[in-house]
Amino acid sequence: MKMLRLLIKTMRPRQWTKNIVVLAGLVFDRQLGNPISVLKTLAAIVVFCLVSGITYIINDLADIKADRLHPTKKFRPLASGALSRKFATTAVVIIALISFPASLLLSPGFGIVCISYFLLMLAYSKWLKHIPLIDVMTIAAGFILRVVSGILVLRIDFFSPWLLVVTTLLALFLGFGKRRAELTLLKTNAISHRKVLDGYSIPLLDQLITVVLSATLMTYSLYTFSAPVTPENHAMMLTIPFVLYGLFRYLYLVRVNNHGGAPEEVLLSDHPTQIAIGLWGLAVVIILYFL
């Protein structure tokens, strides 16, 4: 049981919050009232959590030496030696044999996306995470695949491309914020922990964050009144203030409090961010389903 608990911890269940974006297809295609669609989407989220979980195990297996030099990651099960490499490797094989066939049963398209995500994350762990800019763009691609998976599992014929662009930009914003927080936290030891940080600097990351933040706000605003799937009365524009606050709050945490090294921790622990996301989600449901 102890090994199983350590394995689940290595699969980063707190990181699974990223898989919430799989719900985008269900919500924005107005299928929340369809029980079959809801169940299929929830099953897709579970499968994606398993797939993403084994990528985290593989990443930790590849990063054991670097994680042992990190002030907090050195306590991870694999880095600390509490979880054996053999047990973790065996678990990866077993979970893969369960999750990939399940994804193909849900939908062939969904299965292909899951396999593509897995291969992309393998490439990220081996090569892409060492290339400045490409590393963060790969993370953004992972978010896009999550959204696309939710679309394909329900076989949605039309999904606003605006939302795909917003998802990409938001992921870049979080990714560059994460790199900035790592540089600030690790300081002179940054390169020894993550080689790609040698290609970044605080001024560069601040510029990139500013550009991506501006583009995210403009793209989302354009979506609210120009996408064909939004109400003709442009009521979706009422959600803009929640997006503004959420992004500004995260920027505040990164720049002032030096947080952001783990965006999922911000989501799970920062109450103002949680309130902003909750109010945004409530507003979206009311506008799409009741107005």
Image: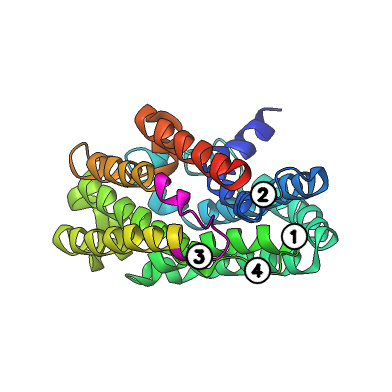
- The span from disc 2 to disc 4 (Cα, nearest Å) is 45 Å
Type of residue at label 2? Lys
Highlighted magenta segment, given as a residue range: 226-239
- The span from disc 3 to disc 1 (Cα, nearest Å) is 22 Å
The answer to which of marks 4 and 1 sits earlier in the sequence is 1
List x then y, in percent, for residue 74: 40, 40
Mark identifier at residue 158: 4
- The span from disc 4 to disc 1 (Cα, nearest Å) is 13 Å
Residue 234 is covered by the magenta coloring: yes
- Check disc 3 and report the residue beneath it: 227
- Check disc 1 and report the residue beneath it: 153
Type of residue at label 3? Ala
At 38% from the left and 35% from the top, the residue drawn is: 273
Mark identifier at residue 86: 2
The answer to which of marks 2 and 1 sits earlier in the sequence is 2
**In this rendering, position of residue 16 left or right of residue 258:** right
Residue at the right extreme of this rendering: 105
List x then y, in percent, for residue 105: 85, 60
Under circle 3, the secondary element is loop
At 61% from the left and 69% from the top, the residue drawn is: 119
